Image (cartoon, rainbow, N blue to C red):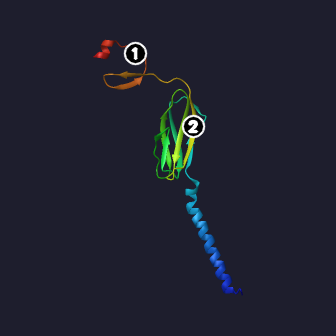
Amino acid sequence: MAFNARTIIAYSLTTIVVVSLCIYIYKQSETYLKGPQLEISSPDSGTSTSVALATIVGNAKNVSFLSMNGTQIFMDESGQFTEKLLLSRGYNIIEVKATDRFGRNISRKLHLTKTGSDPEFISDFKTGTTSPAETVETTSKEINN
């Protein structure tokens, strides 16, 4: 078998095309091969706070369903999500779970501690509103009217 310039160029071009095609196929399927990706950027796990309302911020990629503590949450087109959660006093565990369209799951847990006391609220039965508790004295006659 004689190798002339034409044969060498043909084999070289064929090899380059095949290798390029393999790289292209790998790059296109790489996101599907990795599965769902989930990152929580705020707050950091292990954080203590005196604020009762926590804002959970993160990013999810290759995800078809996203939930926090079992409740579905939504993300924008770029995968960013922001969700508010009311913390109870003491130790709180928040689980964010992502599922891709093939059923693969990934989850991240946040461990947050709510310090201080919870504010007390008084309900106004006439208007249906609540306000922070202060020293308010009422009688049963005022409530029934």
For residue 62, above or below residue 54: below
Does 118 sit above or below residue 7? above
Q: Dot 2 surroundings within 10 Å: few (below 14), some, or many (20 or more)?
A: some
Does 76 sit above or below residue 43?
A: below
Could you tell me residue 30's position as x and y percent?
A: 58, 59
Label 2 sits on a secondary structure element that is strand
Left of 71 or right of it: where is 3?
Answer: right
Can you say which quadrant of the picture contains the C terminus?
Answer: top left
**Mark 1 or mark 2, which has the lower sequence index?**
2
Q: In screen coordinates, is 53 left or right of 5?
A: left
Label 1 to label 2: alpha-carbon separation: 38 Å
42 or 36: nearer the eye?
36
Q: From the image, tell me which residue sits under label 2.
A: 110
Tell me the kind of residue under disc 2: Leu
Residue 24 lies in what quarter of the image? Answer: bottom right
User: What residue appears at the point 61 percent right and 74 percent down from the top-left corner?
Assistant: 17
Spot occupied by residue 62 in the image (x, y as percentages of width and height): 52, 53
Q: What element carries label 1?
A: loop
- The residue lying toward the viewer, choosing from 81 and 51, is 81
- Mark 1 burial class by Cα count in 10 Å: few <14, some 14-19, many 20+: few
Q: Which amino acid does label 1 sit on?
A: Val
Please identify the quadrant where the N terminus is shown.
Answer: bottom right
Most foreground residue, 31 or 128: 31
Number of numbered callouts drawn: 2
Question: Which residue corresponds to the image point at 56% horizontal and 61% vertical from the top-left?
Answer: 29
Front of the two marks 1 and 2: 2
Q: Tell me: 39 left or right of 74.
A: right
Residue 136: image tag:
1
- Residue 88, image x, y percentages: 51, 28
On residue 40, the disc is: none
